[in-house]
Image (cartoon, rainbow, N blue to C red):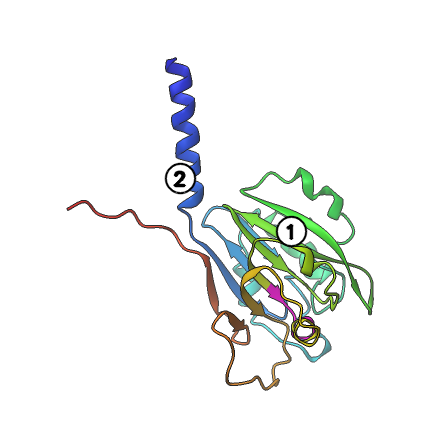
Amino acid sequence: MRLLFTMLLLCLSFTMKAQDTTITAKFIGNCGLYLTDGHSHLYIDFPYKSGAHKYMEYDAGELDSIQENAIFLFTHHHSDHYSRKLMRKTKQAKGGKVFGNWNAGELDSLKETFTIEAIKTSHRFSMKHYSYVVTWHGKRFYFSGDTASTKEVSTLENIDWAFINPWLFMKLQRERIKIDTDFYALYHFYPTQVLPEEKPDNVFFLMNQGEQLILHKKEEESAEK
């Protein structure tokens, strides 16, 4: 009985901890993001080649600030999303695990505080492209990469944040397809791109490099009076 009670307490403690964690996302550039809950570290489509295809450049300090033993996740091989040279140097200096369209099937073996579902999606300029759903402390985040396909994202359920490129977002609007998400974060704009001044409250434009989003806020315990 005492052992059972102890196990129940441990389970309850783990559940409360999972629900009581802040998850943030830092926008680095293009589709490059850094997500953390303060314990685990996830980089998506970073490092990439700075300024590739006239997309966003980034300060070299971003490479120096990469956390040790992080997880790196790439949607495809294009240089505005991925740099083999920079990734090799980063892994040698900082360690970590790297996943992309070449080994997405190995994501099931990942042992982290989050899980990653790889979704094969189309990209007219890439032979092999994946989008991803990351589930972290009960929250679900979708990352489109460069795909313009509405088929896969329209079937997803209970997404808290959808990180999608502008051409996918516009296609969803044109086809009047609603996806099951609370918030949209649009990324992968050209640095000189002009954006509309008005937008829905649940839509965020990621143009300012270094900007941080709170994807899940820690629930503070109420003080007893």
Residue lying at the far top of the rendered structure: 1
Residue at (52%, 79%) from the top-left corner? Answer: 199
Residue at (42%, 18%) from the top-left corner? Answer: 4
Where, quadrant-wise, is the N terminus in this rendering? top left
Q: CA distance from mark 2 to mark 1?
A: 33 Å
Q: Which element is circle 1 on?
A: helix
Position of 200 compared to 157: left or right? left
Q: Which element is circle 2 on?
A: helix
Dot 1 corresponds to which residue? 91
On the image, the x and y values in percent for residue 35 come to 53, 56
Quadrant location of residue 46?
bottom right
Circle 2 crowding by C-alpha within 10 Å: few under 14, some 14–19, many from 20: few
- State the extent of the magenta-drawn residues as a range: 163-168
Dot 2 corresponds to which residue? 16
The residue type indicated by label 1 comes to: Lys
Query: Considering only vertical position in the picture, is 111 above or below 54?
Result: above
Query: Considering only vertical position in the picture, is 175 above or below 225?
Result: below
The residue type indicated by label 2 comes to: Met
On the image, the x and y values in percent for residue 204 come to 52, 72
Inspect the magenta stretch and tell me whether residue 37 lies in it. no
Inspect the magenta stretch and tell me whether residue 164 lies in it. yes
Residue 124 appears in view: yes
Residue 99 appears in view: no
Give the number of the mark in front: 2 or 1: 2
Residue lying at the far left of the rendered structure: 225
Circle 1 crowding by C-alpha within 10 Å: few under 14, some 14–19, many from 20: some
